[in-house]
Image (tube, helix red, strand yellow):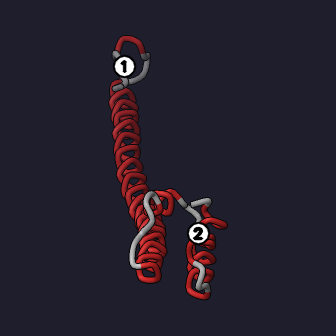
Amino acid sequence: MPIVVRPEDIRLPKRKLKKDLLYRLGLEEGKQIGIEEGKQIGFQEGEIIGIEKGKRVGLEEGLLKSTQEIVITLVEGKLGYVPEGLAEKVREIKDREFLHALIKKLISSDRILEVLKQELNA
């Protein structure tokens, strides 16, 4: 919002008034430029932070999906089929450490269905 100063409101010599008005206008313009530059810098920094966070989240989601698919593929490889509903149940699991432990158990066991029943109630 621009500062409006009327000459009759201020009792100063004209030269002093002109200098004071220019000073105030300069301050206001500088303030507006500073605000705009600050917004731009903030936007750029926010964009960089958002991109980095998006990469991390995407990587985590990709690793989770990959681990889920490994479990399903491992079961299919050992049994020759995937029991009904197992793929959906595995895809609901969001804990990669649990999935890794399950993979180890499935690899070392000859009783795949018992492991699945015990670990997944499947």
- Whether 89 is drawn above or below 100: the answer is above
Query: In the image, which disc is placed on residue 116?
Result: 2
- Residue 62 image position (x, y, % from top left): 41, 69
Q: Residue at x 36, y 19 (%)?
A: 5
In terms of image quadrants, where is residue 46?
bottom left
Residue at the disc numbered 1:
5
Asked whether residue 52 appears in the rendered view, the answer is no
Between residue 106 and residue 2, name the one nearer to us: 106
- Residue 80 image position (x, y, % from top left): 39, 79
Residue 19 in the figure: left or right of residue 102: left
Q: Amino acid at mark 2?
A: Leu
Label 2: element kind: helix
Marks 2 and 1, Cα distance to the nearest angstrom? 81 Å
Q: Quadrant of the C terminus?
A: bottom right
Sequence-wise first label, 2 or 1: 1
Q: Residue at x 50, y 56 (%)?
A: 92
Between residue 92 and residue 78, name the one nearer to us: 78
Between residue 22 and residue 45, name the one nearer to us: 45
Query: In the image, which disc is placed on residue 14?
Result: none
Q: Residue furthest right?
A: 118
Q: Amino acid at mark 1?
A: Val
Q: Quadrant of the N terminus?
A: top left
